[in-house]
Amino acid sequence: MRQPEKIHPIGLSIRGGSKVYPGTVALKDVDFDLHMGAVNVLVGENGAGKSTMMKVIAGVEQLTSGKLILDGQEVQFRSTEDAARHGIGIVFQELNLFPNMTVAENIFISREKTRLGIDIDMAAQRDMTRALMKRLEHDIDPDILVGDLKVGQQQIVEIAKSLAQDARILILDEPTSALSAAEVEILFRVIDDLRGSGVGIVYISHRLEELIRVGDYITVLRDGVITGAQSMEGVDIPWIVRHMIGQASKDFAKEIHHEYGPEIFRAEQITAPNRHGGFDVQDVSFSLRAGEILGIYGLMGAGRSELLECIIGDRRDYRGDLFVNGQRLTSRTVAGRIAKGIALIPEDRKSDGLIQILSIRENMTLSSLKTLTRGVHLSLKREAETVRDFIHRMTVKVASPEYEVSSLSGGNQQKVVISKALMTQPKILLMDEPSRGIDIGAKAEVFRVMRKLAAEGLGIIFVTSDLEEVMSLSDRIIVMSNGRISGEFTHGTATETALVEASAKGHVPDAPADPEPKDATG
């Protein structure tokens, strides 16, 4: 770590910064220093004020009171363009891309390369995009539409977009939330390169191990107040957690011991093609019992999300059979699957899980309006009571359920998505990366809810790239690689080494990891 301040001069500061929204004080008298040529990690629970503070620096928001100081001079950024002119770039937690435009067009949007100022030099933009992708060690075609990319690849495009601006201050808000382990290593190499060239980096993440590894300085926020700020020298995970939530526990989910019920769901030989002539999912079979939590682990591109898309009915081009309570599913529509007791919490909550312009209440009840209707009229009283109940159960931090859902922090938006799914009273709950963009406190709350729901008989299938999560939460674990099941483990037989080795395989093992898995079928 580079502790001495004289090596890392302060390039930007906030002094006495406060930001007030209707009903919410997001920042309270904050003093913050950003060191140049260093990684300044910023951590806190969802709703702690991290994103708000970064939006102030990036020109998205302005302080209600206080000063923003750049290179010793007080400044006020009225827009992101204003901030960019001063050398500030940001990669938002929620991707800010145009899905119907190409990768190259997204990277150079509003900063197009032109020939003599007359027309856009598409060839130059493609060449620069290829160079950026090479730097990020990815082979993404500059001419492919962003909407055709996976979330992790879109994250790479967002990072490339900021690198193309040659920012001297770069804000990375949850940059690894959708990246595989290999892609994270690439990003860290890019960060080291930028740090060596004097760029001041703000790094926001809920993955505490990452912060320890990559950071030079740390700032902790809780309820809009800075509770700790120092160099990373001597900082460990208990220190971070203690300043975040006032305690040193990092326990995700307390075990709620219960007996499993009968088989509630079964998939038989599910196979789904891809557009390249291969398969996203190939010959996948498994079962799930009532009250069981089944974790699906694997690297990006393993076919995990595609499998869930087949189960929920978002994909109809698959072969194979699905059964709920022993009855074969015939409807291939999402509505038909929801009616049969299946609900999905998607990986990309912004585009697939929420309608940003609708209120929190409207988003929560969107999938369960039929149960809230009497005759032909929606019971507004019953809807309001149901929403209040779920806000309480899921501890959603909200001033009013009538506010737009976009006003919530990422973690609280995720809780709204989970509430929407639970309101359909599912028998089987599918969760695709349920902790993406959620802080440690919110993870504990969400995972405790999962355990409680499982104890009540709900069958849960969840996809995750986090080894610690899948091992601590799952009753049984399936590992996928190249569209196939490459390993199966019980809670007692799973080890990190075994899961990683299985995720690197491209075929079903010759012998199962546990011939007679305890409390498991299929």
Image (tube, rainbow, N blue to C red):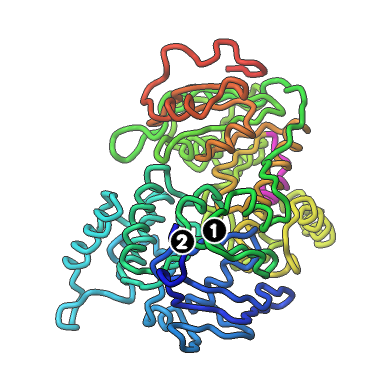
Front-most of residues 60 and 419 = 60
Give the percent coordinates (x, y) of residue 506.
Answer: 36, 26
* Magenta span of residues: 418-427
Q: Looking at numbered disc 2 in the image, what kind of residue is underneath it? A: Leu
Residue 9 versus residue 239 in the image, above or below: below
Q: Secondary structure at mark 2?
A: loop
Front-most of residues 430 and 365 = 430
Residue at image coords 51%, 16%: 513
Residue at image coords 41%, 12%: 510
Toward which corner of the image does residue 14 lie, by quadrant?
A: bottom right
- Alpha-carbon neighbours of circle 2 within 10 Å: few (<14), some, or many (≥20)? some
Q: Quadrant of the C terminus?
A: top right
Give the percent coordinates (x, y) of residue 210.
Answer: 49, 50
Q: Do the residues under discs 2 and 1 have CB atoms within 8 angstroms?
A: yes
Q: Quadrant of the N terminus?
A: bottom left
Q: Which mark is residue 95?
A: 2
Alpha carbon separation for disc pair 2 and 1: 9 Å
Residue 259 versus residue 223 in the image, above or below: above
Residue 95 versus residue 28 in the image, above or below: above
Q: Secondary structure at mark 1?
A: helix
User: What residue is shown with label 1?
Assistant: 350
